[in-house]
Amino acid sequence: MSDARTLLTQASYLAASIFFILGLKSLTRPDTARRGMQQAAVGMLLAIVGTLIVEEIVEYQWILAGLVLGTIVGWPLGTRVPMTAMPQRIAISHMFGALAASLVGIAEYTHHVGAGAIPRPQMAALGFEVLFGALTVTGSFMAFGKLQEFLPGRPITYRGQNVVNIAAMAGAVGLWLYLIADPTATWAFWAMTALAFVIGVSFVLPIGGADMPVVVSLLNSYAGLAASATGFAIGNTVLIIAGALDGASGFILSIIMSKAMNRSFANVLFGAFGAAPEASG
Amino acid sequence: MLTYVLQLYVFILAGFVGYSIITRVPPLLHTPLMSATNAISAISIVGALVVAGSRYSRLASILGFVAVTCATINVVGGFIITDRMLRMFRREEKPAELPPGEASK
């Protein structure tokens, strides 16, 4: 019985992966794109249904509440948002996606650390997931703020910013490595998570509003990598595949967009550091 | 250990497939592509569902509930808006739709 269930779940994941790849492939031509993405939506539905039957799930009230609330919020975000507001809508939905990945990572960590030791490879994946997830949450929110213009669009800089940012990133990676060495160090986990939230803010603030689409696309890539890391942590292939597709797409697009603006990728990300704000726009 | 190696295989091959497909997407469709990959990244709902339904602890259930909510927003909103965008491409190819990187120039 349980074998049959596992088989069904895995079949749904395989089908979903195929539909996602076909969906992306359909986007290479305008006349096939719409149909292909509808297939990808079917793939998503299959993956959700396939997950609802796994043995680990024993209660459904939280799931049902989340699905209902998410649909109530998501529906107007899909149907009402004007096409001109597309970059900020994509930015805010990266925030939701990354928040989901980080929270799953935090819940998995607290559960496993409570239940005993976490194997090191799993800890590496969980840590990566929370690190990239958390910095994408705040980074996307900053990008959203700049595009929606409730935050100033000009680069916000101060002296020694690049040193602070690089030190913060090095600190977060250091904590991540420490966690791999000692997965039971909960203080390191929370410190890394907090630092990641701060990094998201401090890396996006110095980038000008006109460069935001490149940043949004890069954050798309991070959200994908965080999803992939979730897949590694909980042993789920559809997450690994969809996350890898997303990671590749976001990365390639941000490079293409930088080129379209006659700028190098590094220049967009670090151009505001120490430079006059006129570099953007 | 073998499991992790196999997972790495899957990750690299999927990244390779993604790379070869995405470099062939015309600039006209870059904005829908961003929206589409955003919708697809909502696959993290799969992890969220397990956490929300597993009765690990009260904290995990609540985190799972929030995660399911966030991911569902992306599934529902992401696929609807991608479809809305692609509906505009059906008849003739409209060059009016520029990728966001260009639109801001």
Image (spheres, coloured by chain):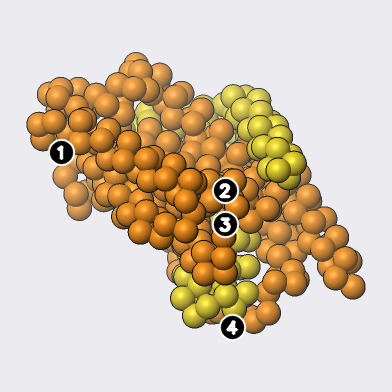
**Residue A33 image-quadrant placement:** top right
Name the secondary structure under disc 3: loop
At 44% across and 30% down in the image, what residue appears? A254
Q: Are marks 3 and 2 in contact (CB under 8 Å)?
A: yes
Residue A61, label in figure: 4
CB under 8 Å between callouts 3 and 1? no
**Residue A156, labelled with which disc?**
1
Q: Which chain is orange?
A: A
Name the spot of residue A228 as percent of width and height, x first.
Answer: 58, 46
Q: Nearer the viewer, residue B77 or B10?
A: B10
Q: Please name the color used to draw chain B.
A: yellow
Compare marks 3 and 1 and give the one earlier in the sequence: 3
Circle 2: residue type: Arg
Q: Marks 2 and 4, how far apart in space?
A: 33 Å
Quick check: do tags 4 and 1 share a chain?
A: yes
Q: Are marks 2 and 4 in contact (CB under 8 Å)?
A: no
Quadrant where the C terminus of chain A is found in the figure: top left
At mark 1, the secondary structure is loop
Give the residue at mark 3: A118
Q: Count the marks.
A: 4
Check disc 4 and give the amino acid type. Answer: Gln
Distance from disc 3 to disc 2, alpha carbons, whole Å, reads: 6 Å
- Choose mark 3 or mark 4, whichever is in front: 3
Q: Residues within 10 Å of mark 1 (few under 14, many from 20)?
A: some
Q: Secondary structure at mark 2?
A: helix
Q: Nearer the viewer, mark 2 or mark 1?
A: 2
Residue linked to disc 2: A120
Q: Mark 3 packing: few (<14 Cα in 10 Å), some, or many (20+)?
A: some
Going 63% across and 80% down the picture, which residue do you hit?
A: A60
